[in-house]
Amino acid sequence: MAITKVVIPAAGFGTRFLPQTKAMPKEMLPIVDKPVIQYVVEEAVQAGIADVILVTGSNKRAIEDHFDAPDEDLLKNLNQGGKTELIEEIKKISEMANFIYVRQKGPYGNATPIRSAQHVVENEPFLVLWGDEFVIAEPSRAKQLISSHEKYQAPILGGVIKEEADDFTRYGYVKGTKVEPNVWKVEGLVEKPGQDNAPSNLAIVGGYLLTQDIFPVLEAQQPGKGGEYYLLEAINVLAQKTPVYAIEIQNGKYYDTGNKLEYMKTATELALKHPDINGPFVEFLKSLNL
């Protein structure tokens, strides 16, 4: 079955970026001239996704506005200024895919948006990509997840090798058996294990390709630590019932824009690659008395 849907959870409060995120969603933070979430959507669309399901909250209207058709006054202004290339660029945003908006309902936790989207994904396998992080890879992370699902006909978890000491207190790591290079059969996932107790060096931060098997697990799920509903805990249960695989995303780099320092690193790195500003930006950085 072709993979045509992606679920992008984007309902969090973005508390690590307050006061900036008091009125603007963290997913809309700019990386030079595009918001973070547009990188995620573009990756999915380039992998063949037709339906983009954005699971949002009450303070996320800016996301809907961004992917909506451009305002006529804006188009008129750009046309009068002879900025036809910008007109085409912003029109493409709303034409990339079918955008479907679901309001998150239910208890707090990153499993809840998946359950909220169940009626929209219907009976199909689907991608899950977070709206405040992305991976730049060749082939793309989304294509690698889809390709692995086609091979194994099972849920696929996307991971990257993370081996710094503080990584083991930030991410969930795979416990399992390597079945071929860069592929593990998952026995379980250990959340923030600490360096000494980590079952592997593969951190699950690269998205998921899930099947309908996840929904009965989510429906029966009990709250975890702090009363939250965690997707990794649901996947742990799922892995005891049906085969689940994890892959190391190849030829790529993971960009975590969910905290201030990593966001600044991402914005700086991609600014250095941006064709419009990379040269002057390099000169500016060199001029700083660091």
Image (cartoon, rainbow, N blue to C red):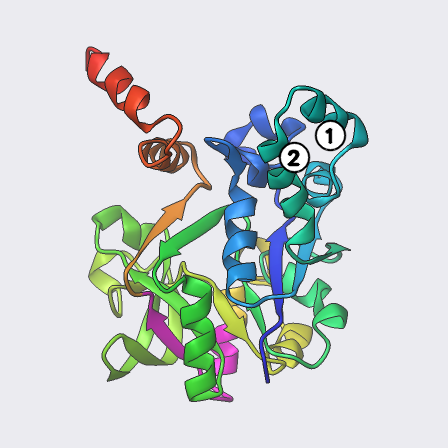
Q: Position of residue 17 (x, y in %)?
A: 52, 30
- Under mark 2, the amino acid is Ile
Query: Which comes sooner in the sequence, label 2 or label 1?
Result: 1
Q: Which mark is residue 6?
A: none
Q: Which mark is residue 87?
A: 2
Q: Nearer the viewer, residue 120 or 115?
A: 120
Is residue 145 covered in magenta?
no
Q: CA distance from mark 2 to mark 1?
A: 6 Å
Determine contact: label 2, label 1, CB under 8 Å.
yes
The answer to whether residue 183 is visible is: yes
The percent coordinates of residue 147 (x first, y second) are 43, 77
Q: Residue at x 50, y 48 (%)?
A: 39
- Left or right side of 137 for 233: right
Residue 144 in the image: above or below residue 61: below
Where is residue 194 shown, x and y percent of the image?
28, 56
Closer to the camera in the image, 102 or 94? 94
Instruction: Please identify the quadrant where the C terminus is shown.
Output: top left
Nearest the eye: 147 or 265: 147
Most extreme residue toward the right is 72
The residue indicated by pointer 1 is 75
Considering only vertical position in the picture, is 26 above or below 153? above
